[in-house]
Image (cartoon, rainbow, N blue to C red):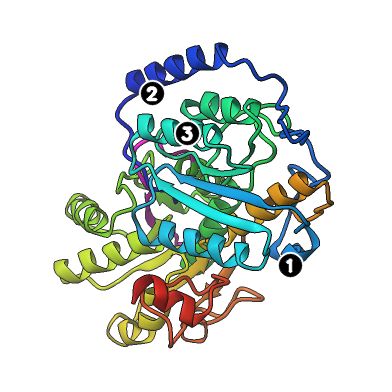
Amino acid sequence: MNRITIRGIAAAAAAVAAVSLALAGCSSTNGGSSSGTNTLKGDISAGKVGTAAQFSKIDSVCGDKPVTVSVVDGYGTNSWSKTVKAEIDSEAAKCKQIKSVSYTAGRGDLQATNSAITGAAAKGSNILLVIPDAGPGQAQLPSIQKASKAGTIVVPFASDPTGKPGTQYLDYTDQIPEYSGEAWAKWVVSTLGSKGGNVVFLGGPAGAAVSAQEFVGVQKVFAQNPQITLLTKEPVTTNWDPAQAQQAMAGLLSQYPKIDAVVADYGAVANGVIRAYQAAGVSLPLLTSTDDNSLSCGYDQLKATNPGYELATNSSRTWIGRVALRKALAAFYGKSDSEPSLYNLGLVEDSTGKTAGTKKPGEACLKDAPTDASPSSLLTSAEFKKIFG
């Protein structure tokens, strides 16, 4: 999910052009740095695909010289982003040589995000972790490349920057969105059964890459199952905001008298969907999304009054920034990191109990954590309370 408001293709193109001109005047070459670190190369298994079971430990890549880290999130204002920041801070605290972790939220402003990327390099950050979602990924790519050439190790994560690891940046770490879309769609197909039904898909901001890629996976599965009718021809825009999601879902409910399943690519959006159904006085349908503590902890109570309600989620991967940090540290210290960069995320919760290896929502519920928490997060309850109170 990742959290933007795109101001139009023309604006994005203009921003790319402006940054490209700046890049052309940059005197650094080939990612070289004053410390001698190659900002584009490392023994880090760049592009490797795998699962969270293959995570590395940060002490294996932490070295013996001071290092500074900057984080730029193109959006950075919702619960997901706050959790991601806390996960990075938690991981960084395990490497005593990390002397600072600065953070900038772009708030959906492409120009501000690009300025923060180049600014982090200008102030001498050794490592820069970027969520390039303040516009299409390519709109931030020139700034990312400029930061790499200025001597900063750059690892984009959680939103596709386009480009190529080892050329414009060190590596890219994330889920594989199409795989997630396929996992959601397969659960819908299995749960609806041979009778099939009508399905809608709610994404993030208009044009968000992750939503578009997840939607491809959904379409791929439904195309093979003609008993399923996908009512939405593209992801419905919600800006990953629960209030906007509620409004969008209310519109869908008024437009389509029968909706049997909803795919929402962010747990907070799924909460907006639930509120729209409740406001309309309509029994909840099948719902699949990313994990969210309020969904997990609230499932049993909702199920009692909505007999057709079922829930399946995959990980919201708030931990992905930890992977990005470890990759960057390995390159900075000249160490090896063999963990995956890209993750296939299957379901972690299934209220029907039919998916192997999943939990029922009540089992996934973090009873001592806030409703905003992600049950698949690596944060402790105490760390969650520090973020959300």
Which one is earlier in the sequence, the residue at label 2 or at label 3?
Answer: 2
Q: Residue at x 39, y 50 (%)?
A: 76
Picture quadrant where residue 320 is located: bottom right
Give the Cα distance between marks 3 and 1: 35 Å
Does dot 2 land on a helix, a strand or a loop?
helix
Which one is earlier in the sequence, the residue at label 3 or at label 1?
Answer: 1
- Indicate the quadrant containing the C terminus: top left, top right, bottom left or bottom right: bottom left
The residue identified by callout 2 is 12
Most foreground residue, 49 or 332: 332
Most foreground residue, 269 or 277: 269
Which numbered disc, 2 or 3, marks the residue closer to the eye? Answer: 3
Q: Is residue 197 left or right of residue 306?
A: right
The residue identified by callout 1 is 53
Most foreground residue, 56 or 376: 56
Does dot 3 land on a helix, a strand or a loop?
helix
Q: Residue 279 at what x, y percent from top left?
A: 15, 68
- Amino acid at the residue labelled 1: Ala
- Amino acid at the residue labelled 3: Gly
Give the Cα distance between marks 2 and 3: 19 Å
Q: Is residue 302 left or right of residue 355?
A: left
Picture quadrant where residue 149 is located: top right
Residues at discs 3 and 1 in contact (Cβ within 8 Å):
no
Q: Which residues are magenta?
A: 195-209
Asked if the stretch drawn in magenta spans residue 204, the answer is: yes
The residue identified by callout 3 is 119
- Amino acid at the residue labelled 2: Ala
Q: Residue 327 at what x, y percent from top left?
A: 71, 50
